């Protein structure tokens, strides 16, 4: 039980800077390279073209940086991509710069 509490506390502390500055310390250029390798094929299969429609559609589900970070983590886990947290942060920095522009 103590491990769960400690993990939850650590997660809150680590995510606090991300709320203040979305994907702080992330590299958009590194994120683009990872995104192109790990994400595009799935998004293109689901949405056609280059897959970017997932980000630009009017009914997109992602409304803030926290939701974007969670979606990246969910995709990583569900697809077994084994990305590191810094990879996820880099992807978030790229997507935020290219499509979302969260502050």
Image (cartoon, rainbow, N blue to C red):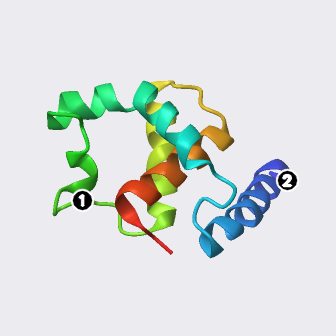
Please report the residue visible at 71 percent of the width from the left and 65 percent of the height from the top.
Answer: 12
Per the model, the C-alpha gap separating discs 1 and 2 is: 38 Å
x, y percentage for residue 57? 18, 56
Going by the image, does 17 lie left or right of 42?
right
For the residue carrying disc 1, how many other residues have a C-alpha within 10 Å: few (<14), some (14-19), or many (20+)?
few
Please report the residue visible at 62 percent of the width from the left and 70 percent of the height from the top.
Answer: 21
- Quadrant in the rendering for residue 60: bottom left
Looking at the image, residue 65 lies above or below residue 92: below
x, y percentage for residue 14? 74, 60
Q: In the image shown, does 9 or 73 lie closer to the viewer?
A: 73
Q: In the image shown, does 69 or 44 lie closer to the viewer?
A: 44
For the residue carrying disc 2, how many other residues have a C-alpha within 10 Å: few (<14), some (14-19), or many (20+)?
few
Looking at the image, residue 94 lies above or below residue 18: above
Going by the image, does 67 lie left or right of 2?
left
Looking at the image, residue 76 lies above or below residue 28: above
Please report the residue visible at 51 percent of the width from the left and 64 percent of the height from the top.
Answer: 66
Q: SS for tag 2?
A: helix
Going by the image, does 100 lie left or right of 57?
right
x, y percentage for residue 45? 20, 27
Q: Name the residue under label 1.
A: 60
User: Mark 1 or mark 2: which comes first in sequence?
Assistant: 2
Check contact, mark 1 vs mark 2: CB within 8 A.
no
Q: Name the residue under label 2.
A: 2
Going by the image, does 36 lie left or right of 49?
right
Q: In the current view of this chain or complex, which residue is farthest to the front? A: 29
Q: SS for tag 1?
A: loop
Marks counted in the figure total: 2
């Amino acid at each position: 039980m103590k491990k769960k509490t400690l993990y939850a506390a650590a997660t809150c502390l680590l995510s606090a800077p991300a709320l203040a500055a979305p994907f702080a310390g992330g590299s958009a250029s590194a994120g683009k390279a990872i995104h192109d390798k790990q994400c595009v094929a799935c998004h293109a299969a689901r949405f056609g073209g280059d897959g970017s429609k997932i980000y630009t559609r009017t009914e997109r589900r992602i409304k803030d940086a926290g939701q974007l970070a969670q979606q990246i983590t969910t995709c990583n886990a569900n697809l077994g991509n084994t990305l590191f947290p810094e990879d996820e942060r880099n992807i978030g920095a790229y997507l935020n710069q290219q499509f979302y522009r969260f502050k």
